[in-house]
């Protein structure tokens, strides 16, 4: 067995995952905060104002990373859920459900910053624009996954039911992505591309890159912290948990 496959098998062990999460969660949070701080400094203090939108465009440095994370986290949650349903891997159930609160938070930030940005640009806080509407539906899906997981007492059955909703809901993601192309939309088209030419000036892109990496690191820390807490709740009463609790008490 290769070392990588052996490591993945070890990671599925609740005690091993607990040690792994405890070790790397603080680092993920720290690196996320530092990276986002660099990005925000560049966005607020270095990048010049936009020639059309002025300083109001700077909310892009929060809005765009949050929007990308809202969709990426849902896709990851659906992937974990599919693996859990097919191969009955308990850790994937835990990780899938740990994705939902962070994903809901990023989606709420996306909607809030979009409304703030839209007010001076569109003259209204809210319009039933296809991109805004589908992002709102995504928030409802996240809340549905969270609510369904909390409503069922048996943790494994709860994770499977909520995971099935996540798998079905992933069909919304391409609609969000292509909504500005498929329908006549107030929302601007794609201006930033990971691959290919972006319509934004290169001098404005580097803080965005820092923010994108920072939000991913922050999410990783949140994912590990939530998954570790859920793992400990599920394993309560096991000897390794009791030994760890007694060690922490000392």
Image (cartoon, grey):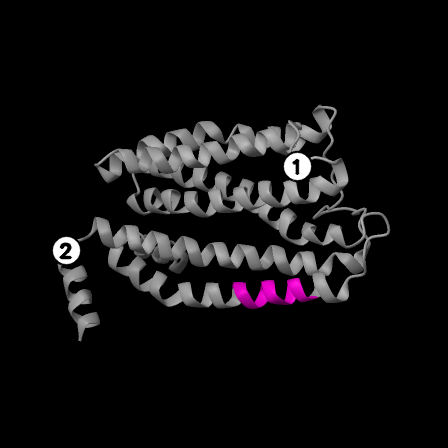
Q: Which percent across, then down, holds residue 198?
A: 78, 47
> Alpha-carbon distance for marks 1 and 2?
52 Å
Q: Main secondary structure of the magenta part?
A: helix
Classify 242 as above or below 196: below
> Which residue is painted at 37% across and 34% down in the image?
163
For residue 179, side relative to residue 28 (left or right): right
Which class describes the residues within 10 Å of circle 2: few (<14), some (14-19), or many (20+)? few
In the image, farthest residue toward the top: 183
Q: Which percent across, then down, holds residue 81?
A: 39, 37
Q: Which percent across, then down, holds residue 208?
A: 68, 56
Q: Which percent across, then down, holds residue 154?
A: 21, 36
The residue singled out by tag 2 in the image is 238
In the image, farthest residue toward the right: 51
In the image, farthest residue toward the bottom: 250
The answer to which of 164 and 84 lies nearer the viewer is 164
Classify 239 as above or below 181: below
Classify 179 as above or below 207: above
SS for dot 1: loop
SS for dot 2: loop
Q: How many labels does the image show?
A: 2
Please tell me whether mark 1 or mark 2 is closer to you in this view.
1
Q: In which quarter of the image is the N terminus?
A: bottom left
> Which residue is painted at 37% across and 38% down in the image?
146
The answer to which of 15 and 159 lies nearer the viewer is 159
For residue 48, side relative to residue 63 (left or right): right
The stretch drawn in magenta includes residue 246: no
Magenta residues, start to end: 32-41
> Which residue is painted at 53% across and 65% down in the image?
33
The stretch drawn in magenta includes residue 40: yes
The residue singled out by tag 1 in the image is 125
């Amino acid at each position: 067995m290769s070392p990588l496959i052996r490591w993945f098998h070890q990671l599925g062990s609740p005690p091993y995952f607990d040690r792994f999460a405890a070790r790397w969660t603080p680092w993920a949070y720290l690196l996320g905060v530092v990276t986002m701080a660099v990005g925000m400094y560049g966005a607020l203090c270095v990048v010049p104002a936009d020639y059309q939108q002025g300083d109001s465009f700077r909310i892009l440095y929060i809005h765009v990373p949050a929007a990308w994370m809202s969709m990426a986290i849902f896709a990851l949650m659906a992937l974990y859920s599919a693996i859990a349903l097919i191969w009955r891997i308990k850790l994937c159930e835990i990780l899938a459900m740990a994705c939902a609160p962070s994903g809901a938070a990023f989606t709420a930030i996306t909607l809030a910053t979009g409304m703030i940005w839209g007010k001076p640009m569109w003259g209204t806080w809210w319009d039933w624009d296809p991109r805004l509407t589908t992002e709102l539906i995504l928030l409802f899906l996240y809340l549905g996954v969270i609510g369904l997981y909390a409503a069922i007492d048996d943790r494994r059955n709860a994770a499977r039911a909520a995971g099935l909703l996540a798998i079905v809901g992933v069909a919304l993601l391409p609609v969000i992505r292509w909504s500005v192309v498929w329908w006549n939309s107030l929302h601007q088209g794609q201006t930033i591309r990971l691959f290919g030419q972006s319509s934004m000036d290169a001098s404005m892109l580097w803080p965005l890159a820092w923010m994108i990496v920072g939000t991913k690191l922050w999410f990783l820390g949140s994912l590990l912290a939530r998954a570790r807490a859920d793992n400990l709740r599920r394993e309560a009463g096991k000897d390794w948990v009791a030994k760890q609790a007694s060690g922490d008490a000392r």
